[in-house]
Image (spheres, rainbow, N blue to C red):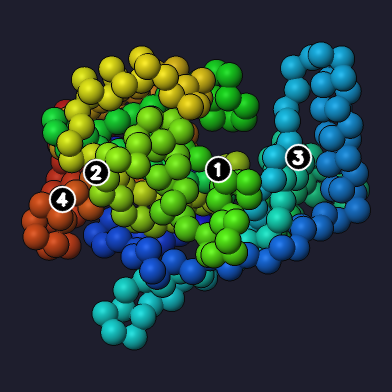
Amino acid sequence: MARDRFTLVGRETSCHVYEGDGTRPIREEDVRVKYRGQRVEFPEEVGGWRHAIEEEERRNEALGLPHRWNNDRFAVERIVVTRNHLAEEPVVTLTLQDADYYDFLTTSLNLERKQKNGLTLREQYLEGEDPADAPAWMNCSFGINVALETGKDGKMLFSRRSAHVAGPNSSRWNSSANEGMARQHDLPKDGGPISLHAVARRALYEELAVHATDELDVELLGFGLDLSNHQWAGFFRAVLPDLDEETMRLRWTRGITDKWEHDRFEFVPADPDSVLGFIADEPPERWTPCAPALFYLALVRGAVRRAGNDHSARFEVEAAEQRVIEARGL
């Protein structure tokens, strides 16, 4: 089954918007994360690829060479979206298993590698079948992506991934903050449920120095699937009512936990014409696959809220997109 691809300012991306249109958030209490402490199991041949990756990284570490360290992650077993019986609000059940970073590398680095059966992983599991139903061992990455607005001066923040970040998205414009879910940080020690909203707040703290004492309005808008790299994503919009660009840039000069993850920040007026214009003015290859979808959903949510929760306000964003397209001859 082929999944449709999100298109913005005349450009088709490789992002599939799995749930959400930006008009309404998914309430925190309606996100049910089920964790099964069972490790993903690779087919024998693919398991051999993982073993080779682990051995190479260990050799590099022993020789004092650059290497990738392993950490505990989650694998997505399934995502199920339903509606409640009252207002038909979305209800999401996310089931997770145990995985680690080397598991993720095993598939992400080898999507085009032929197996003994003559098929690549992409051909067998992502093109020959519905990619949203791929086995858990193919889904060893779930990222939280946040579009952040500064409420005091009304700006949207774009962050460019550093060249030092491993993977296909280095040196590309991305969400304001992006964080992969990790068992060490996101699995509550008291046995309580995993919270995607808590991961979003962690991402803002570690990458943008947004502290727990800062007033923050954060909403989950939906879920996406990066079809080119096969990575799941949760889309959040966050607003800092009391902060502006100047305050945040000054704060960053005094240190950020994960300062190395980004090498450039751009604050753009948060109105649809300005945000979509910025996206259109940067070449498509400079964007991560799902960033345009995230910022579009954030624009729609902002328009709906300003209109007193009138969902038809989403068409203000559609109209702005047409203006951007016409002005640039796209």
Residue at the location (10% across, 52% down)?
306
Depth check, mark 4 against mark 2: the one in front is 2
- Residue 141 in percent (x, y) is at 61, 47
Q: Are marks 3 and 2 in contact (CB under 8 Å)?
A: no
- On the image, numbered disc 1 is attached to which residue? 180
Q: Secondary structure at mark 2?
A: loop
Characterize the local packing of mark 3: few (<14), some (14-19) or many (20 or more) Cα atoms within 10 angstroms: many
Q: Which mark is residue 102?
A: 3
The reply to whether residue 306 is visible in this rendering is yes
Bin the neighbour count of mark 4 within 10 Å (Cα to Cα): few under 14, some 14-19, many 20 and up. Answer: many
Percent from the top left, x then y, of residue 105? 72, 38
Q: Which residue is mark 2?
A: 215
Quarter location, residue 308:
bottom left
Amino acid type for the residue under numbered disc 3: Tyr
* The N terminus, quarter of image: bottom right
How far is disc 1 from disc 3 in space, using C-alphas?
14 Å
Q: Amino acid at mark 2?
A: Glu
* Residue ID at (14%, 62%): 309
- 279 sits left or right of 168 in the view: left
Q: Could you tell me which residue is drawn at 23 percent across and 23 percent down?
A: 247
The residue tagged 4 is: 303
Which of the marked residues, 3 or 4, is nearer the chain's N terminus? 3
Question: Rounded to the nearest whole Å, what is the CA distance between mark 3 and mark 2?
Answer: 37 Å
Q: Earlier in the sequence, mark 3 or mark 2?
A: 3
Of helix, strand and loop, which one carries label 3? Answer: helix
Tell whether label 1 touches label 4 (CB within 8 Å).
no
Residue 89 placement (x, y as % from top left): 32, 74
The residue shown at (15%, 45%) is 319
Give the distance between the C-alpha atoms of the residues marked 2 and 1, in whole angstroms.
Answer: 24 Å
Q: On screen, 38 above or below 169?
A: below
